[in-house]
Amino acid sequence: MILDLVPVPDFVRSHYRKDKSGPLPRRIAWGHPDLVASLVRCYQDGFRLVVSDCWRSAESSRARRAEFEARGGPQLAKRPGESPHFFGLSIDIDYSLALLETKLTKPQLDAELSARGLWCHRRDGFAGSEAWHYNALGPGDAAKPWLAAASPRSTSRAVEARVIDLYGKAFALSTVEVARALASLGYVSGGGTATYEALKPAIRDFQDDWGLDVDGIAGPKTQRLLACLTATHKGGPLPR
């Protein structure tokens, strides 16, 4: 699978949050072209969004899962390819600071950002969980096909519809592609030429490592995760 990612311009990235332990990882300087275009529109129109997360790599997703697991929380972070962050279609912002600087209410801020292509995960206009998370669905009429899939409470189904439109075909792997992906991840040897029956132990190991249902069958979730873990982008190897 080849991800469509482009770098965020320096004049926009200058407003990214600086982590206490040092600069943010390079991966956050990337996003899908539509998300980057929306960020540029926001900047040009006077919205200096302080971004804390953007594109999320497979390595960072796995690290987040390990962190959540160590805390003993009831829910683990999403696997690579389960969050729109992995496809560069989402950002997290400091919305409290944006409200303070713009003197807008949260519903007003959400309306301004959606007009520029960034739609809040929450559709109720309230602060709270995921109120910082915005999905790149496009401005105005461009968002209508995706919003048709949204629930009254969230745009998560809308951005998933976008993901499927962009990459759905790449999630469906043939037996040869499953074998190659498992080989590239170190689960089988021989360059990925094994038969499907011979792949089942490796599939089980892979599923167990990633918290999937362990059945030895490369179903849709397993195929999607394999595709995402072996993805590249149009410019070559993925940034970290």
Image (cartoon, helix red, strand yellow):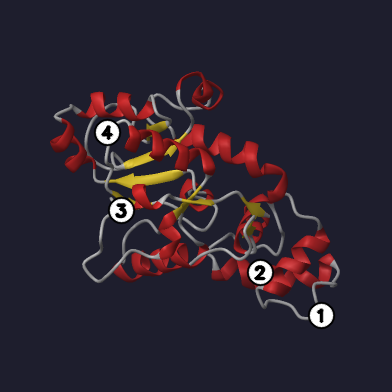
State the image coordinates of residue 176 (x, y, percent, origin top left).
83, 63
Identify the residue at horizontal 71%, vertical 58% (top origin).
218
Real-space Cα separation, disc 2 to disc 4, in angstroms: 51 Å
Residue at image mark 4: 46
Do callouts 1 and 4 mark residues in contact (Cβ within 8 Å)? Answer: no
| Horizontal arrangement in the rendering, residue 118 relative to residue 17 (left or right) | right
Identify the residue at horizontal 23%, vertical 40% (top origin).
95
Q: Quadrant of residue 225?
A: bottom right
| Horizontal arrangement in the rendering, residue 10 relative to residue 233 (left or right) | left
Callout in the foreground (1, 4) = 4
Residue at image mark 3: 14
Q: Type of residue at label 1?
A: Gly
Within 10 Å of disc 2 (Cα), the crowding (few <14, some 14-19, many 20+) is many
Q: Type of residue at label 2?
A: Arg
Q: Type of residue at label 3?
A: Ser
Q: Earlier in the sequence, mark 3 or mark 4?
A: 3
Do callouts 3 and 1 mark residues in contact (Cβ within 8 Å)? Answer: no
Asked if residue 203 is positioned above or below residue 218 in the image, the reply reads below
Q: Type of residue at label 4?
A: Gly
Asked if residue 92 is positioned above or below residue 223 in the image, the reply reads above
Q: Earlier in the sequence, mark 2 or mark 4?
A: 4
Within 10 Å of disc 4 (Cα), the crowding (few <14, some 14-19, many 20+) is few
